[in-house]
Image (cartoon, rainbow, N blue to C red):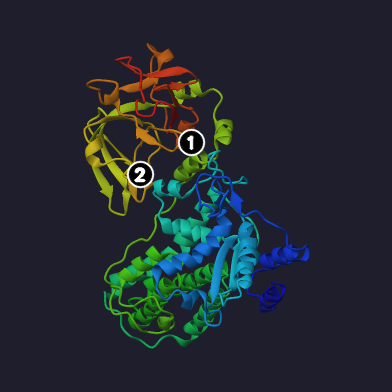
Amino acid sequence: MEHWIQQIDQNTNWNTNAIKITNAFLRDGLKERTITRDLKWGIPVPKKEYENKVFYVWFDAPIGYISITKEIIKDWESWWKNNEDTNLIQFIGKDNILFHTIMFPSIELGSQENWTMLNKLASSEYLNYENLKFSKSAGTGIFGNDVITTGIPSDVWRFYIYYNRPEKADFQFMWDDFMERINSELIGNFSNLINRVLTFYKKFFGDKIDKIELNENFWQIVNIKYERTINFFKQIELKAALKEILDISRIGNKIFQDKEPWKTKNSTPQTTKELLLNLIYLIRDLSILISPFMPHTSDRIRSFFGKSYEISNKFLGTNLGLTTIQSTEVLFTKLEKQLIDSLKLKYSGRTNMQDEQNKNSINLFSEQICLKTVKIKTIDRNPDAEKLFILKLDDGTPDGKQIVSSIADHYTEEELIGKHIIIVDNLKPAKFRGIRSEGMLIATEDENKNFKIIIVEDFKDNPIPGERVILEIDTGKELKSPPKISIDKFLQTQIVAENGELKINGINLILEHSKEKVLSKEIPNGKIY
């Protein structure tokens, strides 16, 4: 084992932290380590008197790397018993380093068979959340199943995580930084270059992409950046590779801005066209380089050109693979502060959220919140985001209202059309994927993330569109029309479902005219969002 580790150390195929942790463990002498757990789930230990035990997951999981390969291909030994010709690279968190550098390699070496041994190791540090630790039980942090409901494309999340991949030190996920990086780097830099160049070229020079001699001075600079990027990939320095790609995009933006093609398109059309064609070939290359980080975005860019080239480094820095611009569109829409603030509050943890709430939530609701019943007339899906419903509502006014909500995973259109729901009527308008939303429906969510919209028909016959929802103690009072509010202001009211009834600090919410209590029948206890 020590001899094998020394070879790895000399080849510097592991990052510094992995080598330090492994050497420290060896220096202090190998110690026994339990490989079983008293759990009901897991792989049972096939030994008498151990029937109630299972293997500890990180003893068992590396063996699973081999077994899953065997399930996929018959010639699995060409991968796992071929140490000379197979390059094994593993990506792990720092808490799993020893299982991959000591425990499993020891099993392989101890068998005295020609197992493929670990070559490159990319261990990452911890990703923390808003100066806290991710915790599902405490409701702190946003997890994969939560991400899906935000309406923010998966490639946006992939971009931010890679941009801040904790390769050498822990990293804090911060919502404000998330919004800033996406809006400035992904949208303002990368997406902006693609949109402005393709739109301008298509408008003034048509769809056809001419094959030209590339500008030598420009591509000499860019090709050096390509070499650096590819080298970063080989060294598994993924964060550096992504930032190098963004630097390349910045070069393109600067040239477009400095050359001012909008001023030269008529006076020197051929020179202007060649400038843009060089930038178009740069965009092709960016779609290739970005593909490991944002595969869907890469495919969308390639579709602008009819997918006339494949993802391959052979195209980088050449004038090959492009003939026409078939279409173009904006890749991403700007993240709005209202959305980010609402997500920040929602996933800040139960204790922290309570600290954020206004102590006088009853007065806050009475003075600043306007809830109304509305009838759902029609529902359309956002063409750019299938999970977003666009709801046209009858709110008792001639024009009605429109809201956008990410509820397509929870309901079908048929389940909701014709139903009466409750919305926050005085929410500031916002845009979601380019569609204007003039309010927010309210729903109950329990601690297991079960989610149900408040349907008025569940507790009231013949609801009236436009009827206010008020606190029971405000019965008979003159109701004012409060100003527009942010979503976090609404969430400060701390509306909850208690035993099926919506309440604030124990006071019921009721319909203004009928005095019916507002109920949450399907989820009797939970929070109202």
Instruction: Look at the image and tell me in which quarter the C terminus lies.
Output: top left
Q: Is residue 377 above or below residue 508?
A: below
Q: Quadrant of residue 273?
A: bottom left
- Circle 1 residue: 488
The span from disc 2 to disc 1 (Cα, nearest Å) is 18 Å
Total marks shown come to 2
Say few, some or many: other residues with alpha carbon within 10 Å of mark 2 (under 14 / 14 to 19 / 20 or more).
Answer: many
Q: Residue at 27% across / 40% down in the picture? A: 391
The residue lying at 47 percent from left, 76 percent from top is 77
- Which residue is more in the foreground, 159 or 424? 159
Residue 428 on image: x %, y %? 40, 37
Q: Is residue 9 above or below residue 55?
A: below
Q: Is 392 positioned to the left or the right of 268 in the image?
A: left
496, 248: nearer the viewer: 496
Report the side of 411 relative to 345 (left or right).
left
Instruction: Name the kind of residue labelled 1 in the image.
Output: Asp
Outermost residue, right side: 28
Vertical arrangement, residue 347 with respect to residue 122, above or below: above
Residue 292 in the image: above or below residue 438: below
Q: Secondary structure at mark 2?
A: loop
Note whether residue 196 is visible.
no
Q: Is residue 46 visible?
A: yes
Residue 502 location (% of width, % of height) = 41, 23
Mark 1 surroundings within 10 Å by alpha-carbon count, few (fewer than 14), some (14 through 19), many (20 or more): some
Q: Residue 314's x, y, as percent?
A: 42, 83
Q: Which mark is residue 219?
A: none
Residue annotated with mark 2: 406
Q: Nearer the viewer, mark 2 or mark 1?
A: 2
> Residue flagged by tag 2: what amino acid is it?
Ser
Sequence-first disc among 2 and 1: 2
